[in-house]
Image (cartoon, helix red, strand yellow):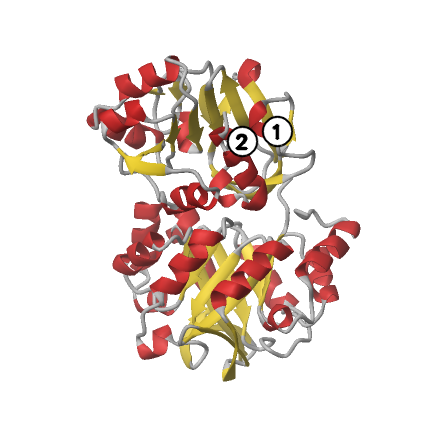
Amino acid sequence: MIAIINYGVGNLFSLSSSLKYLGFQSEITADSKKIRGADKIILPGVGAFSDAKNKLENAGLVPMLTSEALGGKPFLGICLGMQLLFELSYEYGEHEGLSLIKGKVVPMENRVAQGVKIPHMGWNELVITRKDPIFKYVDKGEYVYYVHSYFANECAENTIAFSTYGGINVTGAVVKNNIYGTQFHPEKSGDTGLRILKAFCEL
Amino acid sequence: MLAKRIIPCLDIRGGKVVKGTNFEGVRDVADPVELAEFYNNSGADELVFYDITASYEERKLFSDTLIKVASRIFIPLTVGGGINSLDDFERVLGCGADKVSVNTGAIRDPSLIERAAKKYGDQCVVLSMDIKRFDGKFMIYSKGGREATGIEAVEWAYRGQESGAGELVVNSIDTDGVKGGFDLPMLEAISKRCHIPIIASGGAGKSDDFLTLFKELPTIDAGLAASVFHFKQVNIKELKKMLKSNGIPMRI
């Protein structure tokens, strides 16, 4: 069973439907027992970093998720769920993340070329920089779907894919051992996204 | 670099996909779930579902259809028609929509855009506008193009952007269903005033119309159409290949 962490952030309909479509059993849950018993964990999320972090803390999930991730269980953070894996975020102040992966979350504003639209929203080409099991079904030049205004920075050693936007390389996917993060939404990235989710589910 | 998007629009009435000319004389086309799957397989970048009669007859969207589509199709889905309140947002988001398009509801109560953007984020709120020329000006029409509002379109679009809309759909009533190409002067007027993504709608009759749109107006992010896709006059897969070979960034 794959646990989709439910902490009141974002719409989990597509994520849960896509896993079902792929034939994997999943459950949207905030129950510690179920999460500990799961084979894999997916941490979704949309919205603001501090709000999401507070909700995770209020749900009492931070220590458990951290220990599960460090314990070696395949773990995937999606969009804001990926950003939460890092040490720090500068979205409306300075906020600590889960510190599972080295790096900081910074605004795209003033980093992208002038006149470039923010949020970075739409289909962008995924440039894979390091071979990884999660990309075993993905070819060169495929597109994935992004919606975000902040991105992960200073995380080169764990970056396995990026997309270019407004003159910057936007961190697209990271990995550290069993812990994965994707800035894009695999559950909204059509067939390409489904293949990435399938590869994660097969880890 | 972001790809330009090709978006088929499914106007829904009575659980069927329909398409009319200048919003009159609607006729049935196909089953929405079947058509949505066909478009997904052809490479559509996004799907838009409108309940075209909702704002007139106060009909609610057919949530079952939406849930069925969202359970099988994993690309962004935008839903519009009859969106008048945050409860309406909640309802369609709960059925798997990613973005919600407001039109008449925002004309009735312009604060809807801001309230929805605060609650769900800018990226979730699409301001859809039905626009027609009147006395040499671009004017907003409501209720599926049936009612003049006296609101000037360029300022309305700008106001929507400032209130938190994340995207604009510019639907030209003047070119809708006519199949003579997108309304470039109207689109240009709006794109000069607004910096959020703009989806062009109304007037596509052939593949070349999309090429002209993206070549002439590089600030336009997406082209939306219904009947040319429904009646297979334009095949999305071939259209995207053609655009890409002409230098337009496309997800193939």
Crowd band around label 2 with a 10 angstrom C-alpha radius: few (<14), some (14–19), many (20+):
some
Looking at the rendered structure, the kind of residue marked 2 is Ala
Q: What is the chain letter for disc 2?
A: A
Q: Mark 2 points at which residue?
A: A199
Counting from the top left corner in percent of width and height, residue B220 is at 61, 55
A55 vs A154, nearest the viewer: A55
Alpha-carbon span between mark 1 and mark 2 = 7 Å
Using the image as rendered, state which of residue B38 and residue B136 is in the foreground.
B38
- Which residue is identified by label 1? A136
Q: What element carries label 1?
A: loop
- x, y (%) of residue B148? 42, 79
Q: What residue type is labelled 1?
A: Lys
Residue A99 in view here: no
Circle 1 marks a residue in which chain? A
Q: Is B8 drawn above or below residue B203 in the view shown?
A: above
Q: Which mark is residue A83?
A: none
Q: Respond whether the residues carrying marks 1 and 2 are from the same subunit.
A: yes
Identified at 69% across, 33% down, the residue is A140
Q: What element carries label 2?
A: helix
Q: Nearer the viewer, residue A175 or B190?
A: A175
The mark total stands at 2
